[in-house]
Each structure stands twice: as structure tokens, then as C-alpha cells.
Image (cartoon, helix red, strand yellow):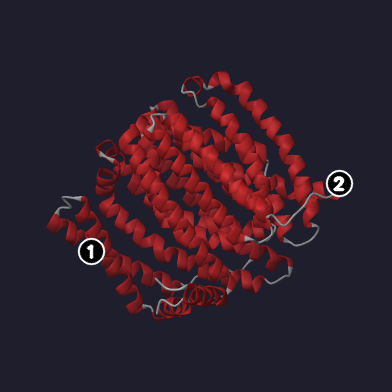
Amino acid sequence: MPSPTVAVPFVTRYVSRIMSIEPIRRQSLISLGNIIGLTALGYLATMYFAHVLGPAVLGSYYLFLSYYGVFSLIGDGGFGGAATKRISEGREQDEYFSAFIVLRVILLAVSITALLFLSPYFKDFVSSGLFPWLIIALVAGTIAGFASSGVYGSAKVGVAQISDLLNTTVKIIVQVIATFLGYAAAGLAGGFVAGLIAGFIINYYYLPLKLARFGMYHLKSLFSFSFWIFLTSSGFTIFATADTILIGYYLSNADVGIYRIAYQITGAALFIAAAINTALFPRMSRWNTDGDLLSIGSALTRAVSFSLLLAVPVVAGGILLGDKLLYYLYGADFVAGTPALVVLLIMQIATVFVTLQITCLNAMDHPKNSFVATSLAAAINIGLNIALIPVLGILGAAVATLVSVTLNAILSYSYLSRHLKIILERRSILNIFIAALMMAGVVLAFRAVTGIPSLWYLLGGIAIGALVYFLVLFRIDQKLRQEAGDLLRTVGVL
């Protein structure tokens, strides 16, 4: 075991290497590691819940999360995004932070009042015993939002990521223990609340802002931005919850559980996009304030390429191995979600563009454009869900999501191109698809030969596919190979 005198300089040198990386790449790298860690924990926990609790109980919990998303949106009113934007601009941060807290407290009261008023319409959900947990979660989420918005708006991305990690870790630990003790859906909801509290503690400790006297100017400034953020967020909330709620209405809680598990698997395609997006917004906001559109355009160009670098092979591999993933990781009950899984995987390619383009529009102070693109797509989403779920079941919900997200990507691209010259690295993107196609051929041949008779064969097929993909990609794309090599050398891997 190395002595402290050896270990400390090693850690110092390693941290220095990390800090020497260009800021956006450094924060994206940290965020990526954070997201992978969080997702791995979430996947492992969900596998355990799926095997122990089954799709029906999981479906009740996913409905809890959906209702939380809807009523927390009402309680936020778009002011969370508005506060993050104004704080990130670096002017009168304490005043904006204080105004934000007052507005959120008022909206929390409105949200809970609306929930209590509508509770008679949620008979199945109320009978599940999760209704009191929903109210507790809304209160805890509001308090946690005070600190997280202040920390993120102050560009303390690392602190926000640590908070997310602690949130997820505590949530999962509590949920696993509660499930083991037999608390079922209530244990899952209680763990969710525990995670919110844990994340708040970290953010509050490092919060650089304090309460200060604010004026009407600060309120008006938040209102001017929050209105469009709220409407845009409503669209995203519809995308995140409408399918779940409508599946629960037309079908059963078990169908909700199967659909949401399929949706969860597809989230792996967005690892890099989510990591880059987390690091981009505060910096794009500052660049926009400084009038530096060139930096925004350059960052968006590289963000798209690096996001697709992971998304495309995940989609290809998931389509070929999706049924086996569901069977071996979650159980035979969830294999029924395979057709929906295939459609949702394709949808995530469009989600990459939606995520990055909407972030650019908001950072550049064009939330109205974000709203129009998202609201039109959300309206299509609701209509298609109502029309397709009774006919096609959960596959109908997946098709509705694919169509509406693709429309959102097209509309947001159209609006963003009016304010920013968008240049895609077509050669690199083509190389990514070529490498993914080669990988798909190898994985398809592997499955044809072995038949994937066990989990180990499944993991072997995934490993072989990943190896082929990166070998081919870095062979045919010198630019990506050089950038990856420089990054690995910087952090000391090479």
C-alpha cells in the first residue's frame, strides 16, 4: 500500500491533469463519468426491483414519478430555468436568487392546492398509498431546487454533479433496503424523497449565494424569461409523462412498468449528450452575453458529433439485442416491451438534437422559439398517444414519442438556424454510422452463431460489438482518433 507521501502527490498530479483540460471538455468528462455511475446504479437497482416487485408495482412507482413531474412543473413555473439563466449571467446574483425563492414558495402552495383539488380523479393512484408521498416529495423537491438552481447558475457544475450522485446513491440504497423489508411502492417513493434531501444538503453547503433585498426589476426579469421556459418545460414534461399516464389510463400498471423499463434502457444512448449538455448551458449563456456566437456554434458542432459517437452504436446494438437485454436483465415478463424498445431507441437519435438545440436556444435568450417547437410537438404527442395506445398498446406510445420528438428536432433546428450558423461535421458523422454498421454486422453474425443462450453470451456480444465499433471508427476517422488520444494522454491513461 503506498504511503501518504506517495499517494498525495499522485492524486495532486492527476487532479492537475484533469484541470488542465479545456473547461467544457473537462466538465463534460466529469459529467459523463457521473452520468455513467448514476445510470449503472439505477440500472442495477431497477433490475432488482423488476425481479422482486414485478411490472405492476414498478408501474405504480412510475406513475408516482409522472405525477411528481407534472405538479413539480406547476410548482416551478419555469422560474428554476429563469433563475439559472439570470444567475449565470453574473449580475446581481443574490437578488435574483432571493426573488426566485419567494416565487417558488408561492407556486408550491398553488401546486399542492391543485393536487388536493384533483385528488378525487386519481382514485387508483390514491388507493395505492402513494398520494401522501407525492405531497412530501413536492415539498422536498422545492427546497432542493432552491440550492440546485443557485449552484448550477453559479457554474459550480462539479458540485451539482456530486449532488446528483449523492441523490441517486441515497435514493437507491433506501429503495433497496425498503424493498427487501417488503415496503414495495411506498419504499420506492420514500427512497426518492430521501435522495432529494441528500442532494440538497450538498448543494446547500457549497451554495455561494445569500438572501438579499430584491426589487420589481428582478421579478419582471425572471417573469420575462420564465414564461417561455415554463411553456417549453411543459412540452418536455408532456414528453416525459403523457405516455406513462395514458398507458396507465388505457391499459394497466403492469404495462406502465414494462414500457418504462424499455424506455430506461434507451437512456444509455444519451450519456454523452447529457454530459455535454450539463456543461454547455452556463458557458453558452455567458458567451451569448458577451456576443461570442462563434464559440457557441463551435461548441454545438463538436457536441453533436461526440453525442452521436455513443448514441448511434447504442441504438444499433439495442435493436439487435433488445429482447435478450430485457429477458436476462429484467425477466421474462418484460420481453413484451421489445417492439416498443426498438422504436424508442431510434427516437433517442432525434433526442440528441432536441437536447442540444433547445439548450442553445435557451442560452441565447430565445425561449419563445423553444416553446413553439416543443409545444407543437407535445400537442402531436398527446394526440397520437390517445389515438395509438388503445390500438397498439405500449408500441403505440413509443410510435407517438418517436414522431413527436422527431418533429421537435426539426422545428428546433429551424429556429436555431435563424440565430446561429449550424455546421455539422458531416464526415465524422458519416464515419460513426459506417462504424456502427460494421459493428451491427458482427453482432448479428455472433447472435446467429451462438443464439445468446445466457447472460454471459449477451455480455460477450456487447463487448465484441463495442470493440469492433471503436476499432473501425478510430481507424477511418483520424480527427476523432487524435482527439480521443489527446484526451487520454492528458488524464494519464496513455
Q: Earlier in the sequence, mark 1 or mark 2?
A: 2
Q: Quadrant of the C terminus?
A: bottom left
Q: Residues within 10 Å of mark 2 (few under 14, many from 20)?
A: few
Label 1 SS? helix
Towards the viewer: 134 or 184: 184
Amino acid type, mark 2: Met
* Residue lying at 70% horizontally and 50% vertically, measured from the top left: 82
* Residue lying at 55% horizontally and 60% vertically, measured from the top left: 277
Q: Are marks 1 and 2 in contact (CB under 8 Å)?
A: no
Q: Is residue 246 visible?
A: no
Mark 1 or mark 2, whichever is nearer to me: 2
* Residue lying at 15% horizontally and 50% vertically, measured from the top left: 453
Q: Position of residue 80 (x, y in %)?
A: 67, 47
Q: CA distance from mark 1 to mark 2?
A: 62 Å
Towards the viewer: 190 or 87: 190
Label 2 SS? helix
User: Quick check: 385 left or right of 363?
Assistant: left
Label number found at residue 232? none
User: Quick check: 274 left or right of 258?
Assistant: right
The answer to which quarter of the image holds residue 251 is top left
Q: Residues within 10 Å of mark 1 (few under 14, many from 20)?
A: some
Q: Position of residue 153 (x, y in %)?
A: 68, 57
* Residue lying at 66% horizontally and 50% vertically, measured from the top left: 204
Does residue 74 sit above or below 417 in this rendering?
above
Label number found at residue 216? 2
Q: Position of residue 37 (x, y in %)?
A: 44, 56
Amino acid type, mark 1: Gly
Residue identified by numbered label 1: 441
Q: Is residue 233 visible?
A: yes
Does residue 446 sit above or below 479 in this rendering?
above
